[in-house]
Every structure is written in C-alpha cells, then in structure tokens.
Amino acid sequence: MRDEIIGFLENVDVEPVGELAPSVLLDWDSAMAEGFELWTARLALEVMLDESLAREDIKAALRAEAIRAEDAKRAVMSSETALARVRMAQDEYARRADSAQRPSRLSDLTPAKIGWLFVAGVLCLGYVAVLAYCGPQLTVGLSAMSLVGLAGVALFSGSIVQRHVPKLLPFNNLREIGRMVPHEDLIGLGSRWQAVQTELVIPEIREFIRRNRVLVYGGRLIFQEIHGLYGEAESDIVQTAGTRRLARVLSRADSVAVALAGHRGVGKTTAIRSIARGLHTSPGSPAPFVVVASAPANYEARDFVLHLHALLCRAVLDRVGSPRPEKGGRLRAAALRIVLGLVFIFACADTALLLWNTDVPRFGADIAGLIRRSVAGFPNGVDRLWAGQPPVHLVALAVLALIPLVVIGWLLVSITSAIAGIPRRRRLRGLAVLQRQTRKQLDQIRFLQTYTTGWSGKLSMPLKGEAGRTWSTQRAEQQLTHPEVVDKFREFAAFASRRLQEEGVSEHHLIIAIDELDKIGEPEKAYQFINDIKAIFDVPGCLFFVSVSDDAVLNFEQRGLAVRDAFDSAFSEMIRLEHFTMDESRLWIALRLIGLPEQFGCLCHCVSGGLPRDLKRYTIEMIDMAAAVYRPSLAQVARAFVARELQSKAHALAGVASALPPTAELAELTGLILQIRQMREPAELAQFATRVRADEAEVDLADPVTRLRSQAACFALFCATVLEVFTDELDEPELTADLHMIAVTRQRMAFYPHLAMQTIVDFRQRFGLDTESAG
C-alpha cells in the first residue's frame, strides 16, 4: 500500500487551497527519506492543526495576541513530543483495527438512506431515459441544453448522496472536489481523531499562545476590559495537569469511578460543572449527559441512593422531553398542506381557463380531446398536445402541466418521507419506552402506591331485618431495603445509558457526579458514606465522579479513620486538582482582565496561594479598588490586601485560641495576636513574628499552643514579605519563579506552619530581605 500511495503522490497535480493547506501531503520526498510511518504521523498532525486553527475561539485567541496562525502551526509541527503522541495514537488504532473487521461502506445504511439513494437513482436514470428516447429528434441547441441539464441532474443526485450517505463517495464534502484531502486510512487515527485533537493538538496550540502572549508591565492598576470573570468559557479555562487528565478519562469513556481530590477552593465543583457543559469533550460534539448530586449533610445511605435515583429520572425526562409530537399539530400540518395544494390546483386551472378564453364546459372538452388524441397516438402522437396550437394555448397547457408535476412530486416526497420516517418512528418508540420506564421508576421512588378496591351491598328483610356484606382489599407496595434500592438504581442507570446512546440522544456515557463530600460533618459518617456508595459504582456505561477535599481527608485521618484505604478500594482512578502555578494564575487573570500589568497578577497569585477560589476573590477586590481609587499603585493594592488579611486572620487565630484550655501563656498570646490588626509596616510584622515564634529548641509539634504560635508568626512574616516585595519599584526582571515560594508559604501555612516558616525565611534570604528580625 505504501508504494501505491507514493506512486499516486508522484503523479498527482494539485494546487494547495487556502493559507494553511497541507504541505506534508505534497512532500513525498520526505515520505521516501524519513519513512512512511513517520510521514503519516506528520500528515495527521498537520491536518488536525489546520482543522483546529480554523476554529473561531482559536482564531480569536490568535488575533488577541497578534500571533500568526502559520507560526503556531510551525511551532506545534516541530514538537517531537506532539509527533510521538500522534504516532502512539496511530499504533493504538492500528492494533485495534487489526483485531476487528473493518466495517463496510454499506454497514450503516438505513431504510431512510436507501430511500434517498432510490430518489437519486430515479432522477439520473429517468433523465437518461428521456434523453435516449428524444435524442434523435433534438436539434443541436436542444442537445447542448440537454447535456447541461444532465450535468445539473448528476450534481443534484450527488448532493443527495453526499448529504445522506457520504461514505459512498470518495469525498465528504462537495467543496473538497478539486483539492487534495487525505483519506482517513492515510491519516491512520480512525475513531481516535477527535480524542487526539482534543487532548493533544488544541492544548498545544493554547500553550503556544500562552507562551507568546503579549505581556504588560507597570506599577499602576490599569486594564482595558473585564472578560468572563463570572463565567467559565471554554477559551478562558486554564489547562492544568489535572484538567488534562480529566479530559483523558472522559475520552476513554469507560465504566469507572473517579475521585476528584484537592484542597477546598481548588476547583473541584468548577471541574464538575465544566464536564456538564461539555468543555472537556471533543469540539463539535454535544455535551455529555451529567447528573450532579451534593453529598448530604445528614447521611442515610438508603435515602441518598433514592435521591440520586430520582435526580437521574428527572434528568432523563428533561433530556428526552416529549418523544411523540402532538397529534393535533400533525393534523393541522396535514390540513394546511391539503388546503395549499387545492389552492395551487385551482389557481393553475383558473389561469389556464383565462388564457384559453372560453367557458368551463368547452375548456374541459378541448383538454379532454387533446389528451385522447395524444394517448391514441402514444408515443409518436405526443406532439399532438401542442401541434397547431396558438401561443396563448401553449402557455395555458404549460400552466396545466404544473398540476400533474406537483402531484407526482408530492407523491414522491410522501413516499420518501414515509421511508425516511421509519427509523425516526422506531426511535420515538424507543424513547417512549424509556420515558414510560423512567416515570414508573420515579413513581416508585416518590410514592407508596396504594390500590383499593371495594364492594358493598345491603338487603332489606321483612320485619325490619337487614342483611349486608362489605368486602374490600388493600395492597401496598413494601418498602425496599438498601440492597434492593441499590440494585434498582444500578439496573435503571445501565438501561438509561444504553437506551440514550442507542436512540442518539447522547453520544457519551452517563456521568454521575457527587459533590461536596466534606459537607458531612462527622468523620465516622463520611467514612461510612465512602464505603456505602461503592455499591452503586461499576455500572456499565456510567462514569462516577466524587469530589473530596484534602482538608477533610486530613481531619478524618487525625481521628484515626483510614479514609485513604477506603478511597483506594472504592475508586479506580484519583485525579488531583492542584493549586495554580504562578504562570497559570497570571494567565487566568490575564484572560479576564485584558491589559493588566503582570505585577498585579503575581501579587494576586502570592496572596491567594494559587487557590483558584481565592484568586477570583482577590481579582474582584482589585476591580473594586480600581473603581474607588484612580489608578492605584502596586504598593497601595498590596497594602489593602494585607490589611484585609490581617483583620480576618487575627479573628480566626483568636477563635482557635479561645477553643483551647485557658492558660496564662495562651492569654498573653491571644493579646499579641489581636494587636496585628493595627500593624501596617513590614518591620512591625517581622518583629511580631520574632516575638511570637516559639523557641526552636523547645518546639513540640503536638502542642496546640506551639502550633498556634507558629501559625501566627508565619502569617505575620508572610504579610511583611508581601509588603516588602510588591512595591512600586518592582519591575520585570524581578518577576522570577522565586516569587512562587510566597504562594507556597500560603498553601502550607494552615497544616504545616513550621515548614511554611522555613519556606518564607528561605525566600527572604534569596530575595535579599532582612532575616535577622524574622528569626
């Protein structure tokens, strides 16, 4: 096959179409030099790049950063990693294709498609038959017109085939005629095409745009516009390692249970919402079918499974809707078509009658006579219809000819619609079955069904005697046990997922997400919840996502509960959503505050610790400050952030101290902590850190008072460092990767205060700040 393709390329004469026409396809010298497999991988990568660069969101991102599409294409094409991943995808598809029989081009023919093929064939054959019959009698001019008509009929029939059965043609679009388009077998990706494009090509383009975006520097808070700060558009999502792995899990679409882990505020709920909106699926494909449930604060296993079952039923009913159109609507549409048809026939007959210029009986007799003479001499006597007639009568006959043409066309359309409607009617019947089953399930969940039937009678007897009988039966559906509820849910979830895909309602497996597991306050119940919900996992055609915060897991483990062991046995995969890196935070802000200087993005990243939820809060606070103060400086914004943090943290630390057993040392420490609310200078905060910090030789990590001292000292030194670093003199050369250590300090401060203190001290040494007063 390799020799045949290369021979074809050597003999083909093709002009590239468009600015980004495939160049690898025409470079057959490279195919000979570098090997056929590597050449096809380069070809597949280039074709996917051309398709991705034509997307509107990609073009908008390139325009915003003044980047040429050719430069982005050249950069991705030169990536050895991208090329290697394409080759691995090709090898995977080749292995699956070798083990499975290749489907025939006729494998997906349905009665509707066969009907359209029949219409196309009748048009072509009928026109050819007319030409064959009338050919000897046609003049040169009519012969030329007939050939033009034949070309038009052929193109029209080809468009019918291309629209309904494109696999029968060597091209998938009429616009591809006359240009070189690689065959899908030459690209060698098959069904993996969309997955590779989503997981590899588009992220590579976005990464190139990120690396080459226009950077703005300055010490004043200035930005051009606010874009999508309160939404999550696809182009505004920052691709992290966690989100890329999440997209890979969704593309595999296996029946798995996945744990979304990470600290509170890291974006687990946002990730679930983005799944429901289809932001992690292939471009152009519909959003997946997602059911989202929040973990209950008061946990009961049976009630939660019933709640989840009810949510699934309502989601199915919302997606399916009413499978059958209203009967009244169908009748009104049919009546309207009949009325319009009769009006058209009457208009044609009336127009012909007026042109004939006679009364109705005479007109009918003349037309009947013409038809009889033509039929008697058929086929040679057909010309008797118009031979010897005046021009006005010829026009009248042409108008009358519209009536049988329209009737024949209406019959053809009706027959074709009836044939094409067979799969749709089958689909509607399937959806009706799904709807009935879903309503039945929902009724079983919501109601305790009671059926009562009764009969009573009365018979009057002599001497005022009476005889009577009353009979009744009552049947009530028994309460289902927890295992029975789980079985019902699993059975319906598998049935709904299979039927939704079979009927074309959803192209993806059913996704069920359970959010906010940390809402369960009691660790024992949360631990039991993890073990109980394992029973609903591993449903064919269903993906389960459960989010849990690392903070909750740490609290559970401190109570002696092996939550991680429960996770390992419950979930087949665990995806960690980490804090943003400094580049990711700067990109997140730059996508929302267009034209913002990079210094302010670094400031927000450091004070938020790279936590997406806090990063958004500080960005909004910065916008509010810009509305109140004209072009505030970097130092002003940093001082406002630190003042806000000092107020909230002082109350939080004082609250922790009030929960500890009262001692003289704790009372003195609480008084010192409350004093930091009035501190605004870095020197004061550094001295406070030195005063409060426990002696290293006497540190007892298990002592809560010592831990509180470490947290207070570390926080004060953190605030002092922010004020000393983010001054109006901070310029581009000083925006190095070392600033990320300030954000790391913020991340570690709550659970690892001693490690956080060491991190901030190391940073101060690197940055040339005073470390003596900080201890």
Image: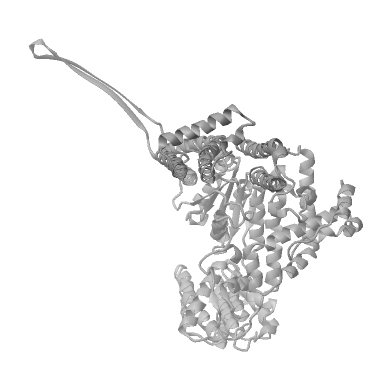
Q: Would residue 259 be found to the left or right of residue 146 on screen?
A: left
Tell me which residue sits at (67%, 79%) in the image: 763
Measured as percent of width and height from the top left, residue 708 is found at 53, 72
Tell me which residue sits at (70%, 47%) in the image: 151
Measured as percent of width and height from the top left, residue 750 is found at 56, 69
Measured as percent of width and height from the top left, residue 518 is found at 51, 56
Most extreme residue toward the top, as rendered?
Answer: 462
Does residue 460 sit above or below 226 in this rendering? above
Closer to us: 270 or 24: 24
Residue 113 appears in the figure: yes
Q: Quadrant of the N terminus?
A: top right
Residue 744 appears in the figure: no
Count up the numbered dots. Answer: 0
Tell me which residue sits at (78%, 47%) in the image: 185
Examine the image and state in which quarter residue 386 appears: top right
Closer to us: 329 or 635: 329
